[in-house]
Image (cartoon, rainbow, N blue to C red):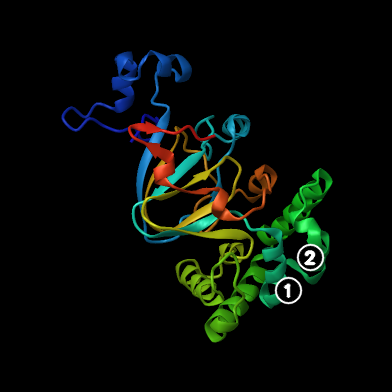
Amino acid sequence: MGTHPSNPSLELSTGRALLTLVQTNQSLLSTSVHDTYGPNLPFLFKVLSIRKALSIQAHPDKKLAERLHKEDSKNYPDDNHKPEMAIAITEFDGFCGFRPLAEIAEFLKKVESFRKLVGEDAARAFVEAVEGAKATSQKEEDIKGNKAALRALYEKIMTASEETISSCSAELVSFAKSHPDSFPSAGGVSGKDLANLVLRLNSQFPSDIGLFNTFVLNYVRLHPSEAMFLRANEPHAYLSGDIMECMASSDNVVRAGFTPKFKDVKNLIDMLTYTYSSPEEQKNDSNFLWKGNKVLHVV
């Protein structure tokens, strides 16, 4: 539901677009909303029923959206940013932001196909760069170095050759099938559950680079009424479940995996913030977000 020109909502009785209604009757938006956002509904609302993984993606901030729209209006149809919030209606799972660095390092040590994908040198360089206290250090120089190491590793993953992805995916799937109890655990999720996740995703998108995002992105499970907020320039993917989703009025998506649509790996690598943490910072109970008839402001 929204006024985005690519697919505005329609009034059932007349077929008029919601965009037309709010532009011809400004009182529908209120003076303050109209003065801030112009004659458009400032949000886009969706109900998603996810039965097959949706793409690994990120949404641009306002400045990047303006540039992408100017350079490639076909794939980036507007100049707006797209932060979004997802509230679970049923059990839901997805990827959300980068894992703590120590978890990624452990996967590199224990999953041979993951090391092969990025190369032994790159794997070793990442592990050495974030070893010990540096992985959780709050010193500015350590954080800067950690982000640089994470970017280098993620670029290796996302730019791997098709031949490498195919062979390493086959090895990974074989490992998940034959040794689910030996699959490494992380983030409170058992190794067996992560092995089953790899097999499920491979059944939907065989030999896709998205399989290896399991080892670098937080795997999040939401119960009904729980929610998570997704900032601009943060990687994520919705894998299964029913959710309500509210976002800025934009259709800009930078995709890189689990999709037959246009993939823009270069812009994805360049735009991400490479912030790393547990998913709890983005996962909140909806009782916290909603107070009576008011929605708490989230930035």
Q: Secondary structure at mark 2?
A: helix
Query: Of residues 46 and 209, which is closer to you in this image?
Result: 46
Indicate the amino acid at tag 2: Val
Q: Secondary structure at mark 1?
A: helix
Residue 149 appears in view: yes
Do the numbered discs 1 and 2 sit on residues whose CB atoms are within 8 Å? yes
Based on the displayed image, in which of its 4 quarters is residue 29 positioned? top left
Callout 1 amino acid: Lys
What label sits on residue 127 in the rendered view?
2
**Residue 109, numbered circle:** 1
Q: Is residue 55 visible?
A: no
Residue 284: image location, x then y, percent: 47, 48
Disc 1/disc 2 C-alpha distance (Å)? 8 Å
> Could you tell which of marks 1 and 2 lies nearer the N-terminus?
1
- For the point 62% across and 34% down, the residue is 64
296, 62: nearer the viewer: 296
Residue positioned most to the left: 13
Q: At 60% from the left edge and 55% from the top edge, which residue is drawn?
A: 278
Residue 28 lies, in percent from the top left, at 30, 19
Q: Nearer the viewer, residue 79 or 280?
A: 280
The answer to whether residue 36 is above or below residue 67 is above
- Residue at 68% x, 61% y is 157
Q: Is residue 99 left or right of residue 156?
A: left
Q: Quadrant of residue 52?
A: bottom left
Q: Name the residue located 64 percent from the left edge and 51 percent from the top edge.
A: 265
How dense is the environment of label 1, judged by Cα within 10 Å: few (below 14), some, or many (20 and up)? some
| Relative depth, front residue between 261 and 290 | 290
Q: Position of residue 227 (x, y in %)?
A: 44, 48
Residue 207 - label: none
Residue 33 position, x and y percent, is: 41, 19
Question: Position of 73 compared to 270: left or right?
Answer: left
